[in-house]
Amino acid sequence: MNDESVAQAPVAEQCGLFSDCEWADIFQTLNLPPQQRRIVGLLLVGEGDKQIAEKLGLAVPTVRTYITRIFANLGVANRAELVLHVFRAFRRGCVECPRRQQS
């Protein structure tokens, strides 16, 4: 796995939600910077602010600032909406991505 896929799929192997390819497609659709991608991935597997801070070597208030920016960038109000937004992005990709249609 190269550095870019690690930035895009921080928890792909741990959570089993999506393959590396699917993470890449989702994050391309969401158009988030690498650190926000990492945080979204950790939120999707249920990590709290403190756990995210510990895993990424950040302060908890910094994580909260990132989460606020992620919500604003994606137009969601909370973590539940974020999860729905990500899964909708995945479903759109399933329909639109020829790479997935071939498999």
Image: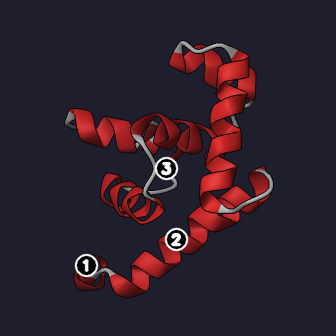
Are there few (<14), some (14-19), or many (20+) residues within 10 Å of tag 3?
few
Examine the rendered structure and indicate whether residue 75 appears above or below residue 100. above
Tell me what residue is drawn at x 31 percent, y 80 percent: 97
Quadrant containing the C terminus in the rendered view: bottom left
Tell me what residue is drawn at x 34 percent, y 56 percent: 24
Are there few (<14), some (14-19), or many (20+) residues within 10 Å of tag 1?
few
- Closer to the chain start, of discs 3 and 1, is 3
Q: How many marks?
A: 3
Examine the rendered structure and indicate whether residue 62 appears above or below residue 73. above
Q: Secondary structure at mark 1?
A: loop
Out of 65 and 83, give the one closest to the viewer.
Answer: 65
Mark whose residue sits in front, 2 or 1: 2
Q: Which residue is mark 2?
A: 89
Tell me what residue is drawn at x 71 percent, y 41 percent: 68
Check disc 3 and give the amino acid type: Gly
Q: Which residue is mark 3?
A: 16
Are there few (<14), some (14-19), or many (20+) residues within 10 Å of tag 2?
some
Check disc 1 and give the amino acid type: Ser
* Left or right of 96 on screen, residue 3: left
Q: Secondary structure at mark 2?
A: helix
Check disc 2 and give the amino acid type: Ala
Provide residue 8's location: percent of width, then percent of height. 37, 44
Out of 64 and 102, give the one closest to the viewer.
Answer: 64
Q: Say how the picture is coloured.
A: secondary structure
Q: Which residue is mark 1?
A: 103
